[in-house]
């Protein structure tokens, strides 16, 4: 099956078994367009470091303007379509079919500095590329942008599957905007980060190359909070190599091919990342709905017990009254009143007991969870994951129970939960790439 077909099949399963339970549980799920979008590659870096040139090379077309002076002053999303056209920022961020509507939160300053470009290019059928404005390594540059650059970069980086951070041999420093992007925008998501040191043909010799490469690593190690250095691709764009290049180019050409292959593999990885997200939603929902229904059973049985107790009391009192009343009707008076009181309680008490049981249940969610999943918790394999998932599911469930109560959460039948368990336990994991 092609990757996109696999994603569609996963989404079908999600629609059938996860979405209805999420509706019952009032749990917000990621909208489908966000899961269906092809993987995205975000190109970031100094101005004139070759971001737009790499895009033109990858697409084998002169799509993006390139130049020595700062060229791009906004974000450009490159997407696939048979009819080439430009999409302005307003249209791009208003289209619910595209995953960019959240960009509106950054204000009109950004909307005017983002655009879409639809092209018929092979690569774009599987991957979307995002070109960004060159970063300026001088302090105070933020003020010149009519939007919060670091936050916008963070948003794009979160949505992306690969972040390429470009450096120029002439400016391997990490100051100004590059530093704020590394510190503010990429923390926590730096596992998607790869470094591209481009224009390798500009070096005057191997010593020059070694010095600059060392400086880049040193600067990165000081700016990044990770223990591992991200992979560094040392590349040249073949069309742009200067004629009097002093270094052998084979290694740099190989690095570019390696980068292209990595980008080509992204759609395959995408299936796994969609799958992980959907499975995560499914696991949380199974826990939430199982514990919700366990609590509902407790509340229902407390109400039924109260009804039975009231009805029995009324019956017994009426019976005694009837027997005593046969001798003299006055003797039936007290049991009769008691029977009436018990009947009155039958209308009122079960509701009160039910509400009290529900409130008490909020503090017993852990016990209900431990009981419902005792078999899995006893085994070693899943116990830790399960506890971890429960910690997240519990927070959402408790918030919802306090807001809308049990009545606000529609019932999820045993059958629905069984099908959900089979979907996340057997059907979906089978789509994970080997
Ligand atoms: N010698 C050489 N020049 C390159 C290479 N890659 C890009 N260039 C040149 O570098 C200049 C800047 O390239 P761009 O692709 O516009 O850089 P950019 O990162 O998009 O720049 P901004 O849009 O300003 O952020 C252009 O004149 C390119 O021709 C390379 O590998 N070798
Ligand atoms: Mg550019």
Image (spheres, rainbow, N blue to C red):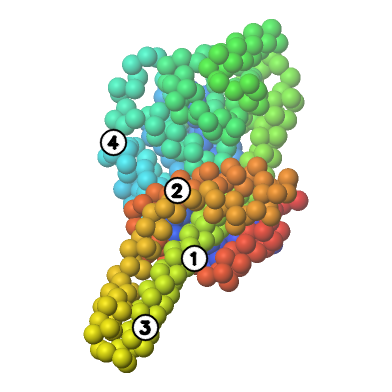
User: What is the x, y in percent for residue 185?
Assistant: 46, 29
Counting residues from the start of the chain, the first of labels 4 and 1 encountered is 4
Counting residues from the start of the chain, the first of labels 2 and 3 encountered is 3
For the residues labelled 4 and 1, say whether their Cβ atoms are less than 8 Å apart.
no
How far apart marks 3 and 4 lie (CA) works out to: 83 Å
For the residues labelled 1 and 2, say whether their Cβ atoms are less than 8 Å apart.
no
Q: Identify the residue at horizontal 41%, vertical 77% (top origin).
A: 312
In this rendered view, identify the residue nearer to me: 405 or 431. 405
Counting residues from the start of the chain, the first of labels 2 and 4 encountered is 4
Secondary structure found at label 1: helix
113 versus 353 height, above or below: above
Residue labelled with disc 2: 363
Counting residues from the start of the chain, the first of labels 3 and 4 encountered is 4
Left/right placement of residue 144 relative to residue 354 reads: left
Secondary structure found at label 2: loop
How far apart marks 2 and 4 lie (CA) works out to: 48 Å
How many numbered marks appear? 4
Counting residues from the start of the chain, the first of labels 1 and 2 encountered is 1
How far apart marks 2 and 3 lie (CA) works out to: 41 Å
Residue labelled with disc 4: 109
User: What is the x, y in percent for residue 220?
Assistant: 57, 17
Residue labelled with disc 3: 320
Identity of the residue furthest to the bottom in this view: 326
Nearer the observer, disc 3 or disc 1?
3
In terms of image quadrants, where is residue 4? bottom right
Secondary structure found at label 4: helix
Nearer the observer, disc 3 or disc 4?
3
Nearer the observer, disc 4 or disc 1?
1
How far apart marks 3 and 1 lie (CA) works out to: 34 Å
């Amino acid at each position: 099956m092609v990757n996109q077909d696999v994603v569609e099949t996963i989404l079908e399963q999600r629609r059938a078994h996860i979405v209805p339970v999420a509706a019952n549980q009032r749990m917000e799920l990621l909208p489908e367009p966000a899961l269906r979008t092809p993987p995205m590659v975000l190109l970031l870096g100094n101005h004139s470091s070759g971001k737009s040139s790499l895009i033109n090379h990858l697409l084998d077309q002169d799509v993006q303007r390139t130049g020595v002076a700062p060229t791009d002053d906004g974000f450009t999303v490159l997407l696939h379509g048979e009819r080439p056209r430009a999409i302005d920022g307003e249209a791009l961020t208003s289209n619910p079919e595209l995953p960019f509507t959240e960009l509106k939160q950054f204000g009109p300053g950004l909307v005017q500095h983002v655009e879409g470009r639809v092209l018929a290019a092979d690569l774009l059928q599987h991957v979307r590329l995002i070109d960004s404005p060159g970063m300026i390594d001088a302090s105070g540059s933020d003020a010149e942008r009519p939007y919060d650059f670091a936050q916008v970069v963070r948003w794009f980086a979160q949505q992306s599957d690969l972040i390429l951070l470009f450096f120029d041999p002439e400016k391997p420093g990490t100051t100004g905007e590059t530093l704020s992007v590394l510190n503010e925008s990429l923390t926590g998501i730096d596992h998607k980060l790869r470094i591209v040191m481009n224009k390798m043909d500009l070096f005057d010799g191997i010593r020059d190359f070694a010095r600059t490469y060392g400086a880049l690593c040193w600067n990165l190690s000081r700016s990044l909070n990770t223990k591992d250095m991200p992979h560094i691709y040392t590349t040249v764009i073949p069309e742009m190599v200067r004629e009097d290049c002093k270094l052998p180019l084979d290694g740099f050409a190989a690095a570019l091919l390696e980068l292209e292959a990595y980008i080509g593999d992204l759609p395959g990885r995408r299936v796994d990342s969609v799958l992980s997200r959907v499975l995560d939603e499914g696991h949380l929902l199974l826990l939430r709905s199982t514990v919700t229904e366990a609590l509902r059973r407790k509340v229902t049985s407390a109400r039924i017990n109260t009804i039975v107790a009231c009805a029995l009391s009324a019956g017994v009192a009426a019976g005694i009254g009837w027997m005593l009343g046969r001798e003299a009707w006055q003797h039936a008076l007290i049991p009769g009143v008691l029977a009436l009181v018990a009947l009155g309680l039958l209308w009122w008490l079960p509701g009160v007991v039910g509400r009290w049981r529900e409130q008490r249940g909020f503090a017993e969610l852990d016990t209900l969870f431990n009981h419902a999943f005792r078999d899995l918790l006893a085994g070693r394999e899943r116990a830790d994951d399960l506890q971890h998932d429960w910690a997240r599911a519990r927070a959402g469930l408790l918030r919802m129970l306090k807001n809308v109560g049990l009545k606000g959460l529609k019932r999820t039948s045993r059958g629905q939960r069984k099908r959900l368990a089979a979907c996340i336990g057997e059907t979906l994991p089978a789509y994970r790439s080997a």
